[in-house]
Image: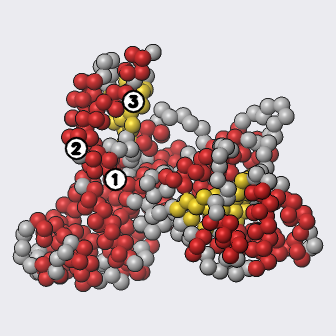
């Protein structure tokens, strides 16, 4: 058994990683190989990269060395393949059923029937597509994701209540839905209640008007798990907050579980009643941050794979198009997925051959007006300040890398978020030819995929310019 364990793909990969981490450096290794894993498949093995961009980078920059180390350490001399996570999942090597497949399970004796569970869940507003399987985790949300999985599994030692917070479009609703689906699957005999804060308020007001408050209280306080989405909407509503406070106390004291979401931390919910805010702070507060570039690319690839599984179209797109979407739609996962949906709706299966300029033309009407108002002057000032230069440096003839690279980045950003033509951009950067701008744009496109530091610089600058 020990020999078999040492010969597993994971064990061989661990040995190879020790060498690769030393040779590549911790930063580069972590950015491109840190989330990769080897999976045994039949007589061979597959290195599964986090996404297609990471897969392409590995193939260009590290595959030869990885293949050498694999041949050196693998005692079974197996063939090693390379795939992105979306490709690996799509071909069915990983056959984990979606959480929503609870509807297809045959109930055992004494168990609540799966169709009944599914019907009740949909009546509460749960969305089938929001499951743990369809949620893409990364550094920006991995803590909230891990806590959500633990709550959904009815694990002991849980914190109560749990508050997941983050701005609009960061995946909070997705996680609360996923908790509900998985909790129902894991324990169909238990009572799971999902409500938006708006529905909680309207139902409570109607219960007061109809003199049915006792029934309303019983409905919620008999829940084994209460999920309340967008709790910030009860702020400024004294009677609703009072009822929510007593519901929260009753559930927690009875050992039942409560998970809520909000668009900010409890301390920032200034219009919320202090007692309620204090009890939210006393639980476990999980923040969800803005998705980084790698996570946004992973979300796009998962979306493509989901559409492919639904038989909609071929599960691929040009890397440059996905990178454009990931760089341009940074504020909200919903906006990011919406941009991809727009391309799919327009070109369907032809998205696999869609060029960057064609994608930009399709999405131009959907880009925010705020981005169109960013001027070349603002871009130059922001880039110069970020790299410790002057605006004059970017327009000068200096060719030192310390100046040339920021100048190329400024040209790339100008091409991405303004409507300036290439000749006009060249003129604004010291009277340069449009071919210089084309070279700068292509060079930065390549470096973004190869150098995490440059990708991070660009992301920080885009956030600053977009406000």
Residue in the image at 75% along x and 74% along y: 241
Query: Which of the colour schemes (rainbow, by chain, secondary structure, one colour) is used?
Result: secondary structure
Label 3 vs label 2: CA separation? 20 Å
Residue in the image at 28% along x and 28% along y: 70
Q: Secondary structure at mark 1?
A: loop
Of the numbered discs 3 and 2, the one sitting upstream in the chain is 3
Q: Secondary structure at mark 2?
A: helix
Residue in the image at 42% along x and 27% along y: 40
- State the image coordinates of residue 65 (x, y, percent, origin top left): 21, 35
Q: Secondary structure at mark 3?
A: helix
Q: In front: mark 3 or mark 1?
A: 3
- Res 197 visible: yes
Q: Which residue is mark 2?
A: 24
Label 2 vs label 1: CA separation? 27 Å
CB-based contact (under 8 Å), mark 3 and mark 1: no
Of the numbered discs 3 and 1, the one sitting upstream in the chain is 3
CB-based contact (under 8 Å), mark 3 and mark 2: no
Q: Which residue is mark 3?
A: 10
Q: In front: mark 2 or mark 1?
A: 2
Asked if 104 appears above or below 396 in the picture, the reply is above
Q: Which residue is mark 1?
A: 318
- State the image coordinates of residue 360 (x, y, percent, origin top left): 35, 67
- Depth check, front residue: 11 or 391: 11
Asked if 87 appears above or below 467 in the picture, the reply is above
Q: Is residue 466 left or right of residue 65?
A: right
- State the image coordinates of residue 173 (x, y, percent, origin top left): 61, 60
Q: Is residue 260 left or right of residue 245?
A: left
């Amino acid at each position: 058994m020990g020999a078999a364990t040492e010969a597993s793909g994971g064990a061989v990969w661990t040995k190879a990683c020790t060498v690769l981490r030393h040779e590549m450096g911790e930063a580069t290794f972590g950015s491109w190989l840190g989330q990769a894993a080897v999976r045994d498949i039949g007589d061979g093995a597959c290195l599964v990269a986090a996404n297609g961009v990471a897969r392409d980078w590995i193939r260009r920059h590290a595959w030869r060395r990885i293949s050498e180390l694999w041949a050196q350490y693998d005692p079974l001399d197996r063939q090693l393949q390379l795939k992105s996570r979306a490709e690996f999942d799509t071909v069915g090597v990983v056959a984990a059923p979606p959480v929503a497949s609870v509807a297809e399970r045959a109930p055992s004796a004494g168990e609540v029937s799966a169709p009944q569970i599914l019907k009740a869940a949909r009546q509460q507003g749960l969305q089938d597509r929001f499951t743990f399987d369809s949620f893409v985790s990364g550094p920006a949300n991995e803590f909230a994701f891990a806590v959500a999985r633990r709550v959904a599994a009815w694990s002991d030692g849980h914190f109560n209540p749990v508050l997941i917070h983050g701005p609009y479009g960061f995946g909070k609703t997705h996680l609360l839905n996923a908790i509900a689906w998985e909790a129902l699957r894991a324990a169909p005999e238990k009572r799971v209640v999902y409500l938006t804060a708006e529905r909680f308020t309207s139902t409570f007001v109607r219960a007061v008007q109809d003199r049915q408050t006792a029934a309303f209280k019983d409905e919620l306080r008999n829940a084994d798990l209460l999920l309340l989405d967008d709790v910030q909407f009860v702020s400024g509503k004294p009677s609703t907050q009072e009822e929510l406070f007593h519901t929260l106390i009753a559930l927690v004291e009875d050992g039942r579980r409560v998970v809520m979401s909000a668009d900010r931390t409890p301390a920032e919910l200034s219009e919320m009643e202090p007692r309620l805010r204090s009890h939210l702070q006393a639980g476990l507060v999980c923040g969800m941050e803005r998705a980084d570039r790698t996570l946004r690319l992973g979300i796009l690839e998962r979306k493509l794979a989901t559409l492919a599984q639904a038989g909609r179209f071929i599960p691929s797109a040009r890397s440059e198009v996905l990178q454009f979407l990931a760089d341009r739609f940074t504020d909200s996962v919903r906006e990011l997925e919406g941009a991809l949906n727009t391309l799919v709706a327009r070109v369907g299966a032809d998205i696999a051959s869609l060029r960057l300029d064609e994608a930009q033309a399709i999405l131009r009407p959907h880009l925010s007006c705020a981005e169109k108002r960013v001027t070349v002057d603002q871009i130059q000032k922001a880039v110069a300040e970020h790299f410790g230069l002057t605006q004059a440096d970017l327009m000068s003839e200096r060719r030192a890398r310390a100046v040339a690279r920021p100048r190329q980045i400024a040209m790339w950003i100008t091409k991405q978020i303004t409507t300036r033509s290439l000749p006009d951009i060249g003129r604004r950067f010291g009277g340069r030819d449009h071919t210089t701008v084309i070279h700068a744009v292509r060079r930065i496109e390549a470096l973004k995929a190869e150098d995490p530091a440059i990708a991070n610089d660009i992301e920080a600058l885009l956030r600053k310019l977009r406000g």
